[in-house]
Image: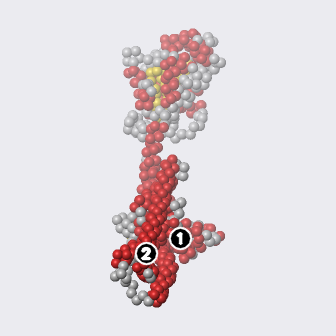
Amino acid sequence: MAACIAAAAAAAFFWSLGQARVYRAEVMLRLDPEPARPLGQKVELVSSTPPWAVNHREFFATEHRVMRSMRVATAVVRTLGLQNDASFLGVPAAHRAQFKPWLVEDAAIVLISRVSVDPVKDSSLVVLHYEDTDPNRCQLVLNTVARTYVAQNLDTSVALSATAEEWLRGQLEHLKTDLESSERALNDFRQKNNVLSISLEDRHNIISSQLEQIAKDSAALEFKRFDLAARNAELAKIKPEDPTNYGATELLHSPVLSNLRTSYADQQKTVEELIATLGENHPKVVAARAKLDAIAKSMRNEIVNIQTATARELRAMDRTLADLRKKDDDLQKQAHELQGFEIPFNQLARTKTHNEKIYGIVLERARETELTRMLNINNVRIIDDALTPRRPVRPNVPLNLAIGAFAGLLLGVGLAVWREVGDQSLRTPEDVEALGAASLGLIPEIERRNRRRTRLSVAALGDRDLIVAREPDSGVAEAMRAVRTNLMFMSPDKPFSCFLVTSALPEEGKTTVAVSLATVLAQSGHRVALVDTDLRRPRLHRTFNVSNDLGVTMAVSGQATLDEAVLATSVPGVDVLPCGPIPPNPAEMIQSESFARLVHQLKTKYDRVVFDSSPILPVTDAAILSQHVDGVIVVSRAFRTHRGALRQAIRTLADVKGRVIGVILNAVDLGRYDYKDQYYYRRDNYYGDDKEQSAA
């Protein structure tokens, strides 16, 4: 665990050292949704901020996006020549000799990727961040971005004011012509008809009063109609197909449309976030887009409704004006005999008055717009310029070390969990007992210095198998004596006298255990016969360095007697019965009556009989032989024998009603954490022997 944490932390540290230093600068700006009104609150300013966006998040969200727009970025790139700066573009130093200038648009994309916007909560302030590997360039680029954004915002406001002023000036020319025309007509009528007064109410009180009222109503409606017609003309320019792209105008001052626009912006942001996290074709993205289309459709419908309502209102006003004119004509006819030339005179006077009023309103608005443009009112300004950063923000070495250490911790925990869950080899007596078998003991690992899987010589095999006899104070000898004690206490009333030592698979140390078991049984005062019934790969004759000419196969076939086949060994109290010539049919020989008689003779002649047999799973010899013994001892190699193999071996013996006394866990490394201070004392404190020993 500690090694994993240390290695991961070291990797994070050296990785951090190899990363380029990144610096961050920041500039603070203030955004005012409603600009100042130096000409008074009654004077409306023409600005880039739509009236419906005041005090709404849409204004700030829009401006935040404009700060990172291609328009601002390309202007900055051209101003500073960043398309020619290989360092800014991240070109490695080794490739800068072949560097060619980038397109301005590509360099602008790089710039946008390094700019971030951070609104200050509960305020109209916003902080622009920019990151670069050069601290001086970092300051320069960010200040240029801020100033370019402010300048472009002012240019937009001025351009809008200029457009409005140009339109008003155009209308003013037409109104001036109409006013002059009406004045000339009235003056000509006066001179021609010698009319020195415009008041004839004394002669036509009732009719004149009615005509005057109609004139007032007509003038008011004409004024309203002028505004309404202008509004209708402006609305007609709006394309409902793209309701999100209409210009800034108070004519769309609709609460419903404002709410829909808010919903559209929020839903559009939601769609972008879903695409970034889930991809284009995710069901949630499709559903979100459908909702966005529905909002857009509602916006189009609302705009159409506004256009329709305005046109309908204009038609109604036209009908009203027509009605008033008709009424006026009727009155004129009634007063024709009385009024004579008074009627055209009053008409000309009303026309002149009407034109004067409209001309005055438009002239005042044009002058206000001109003053607004000349004042250069800007609703965006810089509060704090960017300073040259002194320290890099990345790489964050402490943070990377913490992340590396945490990753190492996770790796260590994962390895530990895998070791506990994924490793299905036998490791402890508890693993053996979990399979329903008794644990007879742990045999320490032999020859730790030689961990390579190399084939041992005959002499080396003999030395390894006879370690208990030659080194009675070794850890292996003590462990085998513990096994002997466990066997004695497992059946104190009727001790086991005939054992079969086998294993689930080859090379698990069964022969070494069989020789060691025979040795410790002989050391307790018993006459022991060690029988090599591994009729396929016999080894006991090499262990004891005796002849294999006579043995089990010769005794079973009747070609030799038991006394002739049994040989004395260098281990006191232990005689060995070698395998003899390997038979063509080992399983049939073990099943024969002759073999059963041989086993009976051995039990009669010796106190204890130990059979060394073939592995259980590859062949059936051990399963057959289990019928002739008191019990079977299964040898398993620690951290090598799979639990499934041992389980299958025990099941195979159970199927033939063989009695499994228990399992010996062999080749145990007592220095491992799994065994240390759990099953044995340390060897230097208990076994009295600190020699490096060889694996069974």
Q: Is residue 392 visible?
A: no
Which of 190 and 296 lies nearest the eye of the viewer?
190
The quarter holding residue 680 reads: top left
Residue 638 percent coordinates (x, y): 48, 33
Question: Label 2: which residue?
Answer: 332
Q: Kindly identify the residue that appears in the image at 40 percent across and 70 percent down.
A: 33
Residue 450 percent coordinates (x, y): 54, 39
- Alpha carbon distance from label 2 to label 1: 63 Å
Q: Kindly identify the residue that appears in the image at 59 percent across and 71 percent down.
A: 104
Residue 251 percent coordinates (x, y): 44, 67
Which of 319 and 459 lies nearest the eye of the viewer?
319
Question: Label 1: which residue?
Answer: 71
- Marks 2, 1: nearer the viewer: 2
Secondary structure state at the residue bearing disc 1: helix
Which of 395 and 50 lies nearest the eye of the viewer?
50
- The answer to whether 79 appears left or right of 679 in the picture is right
Amino acid type shown at disc 1: Arg
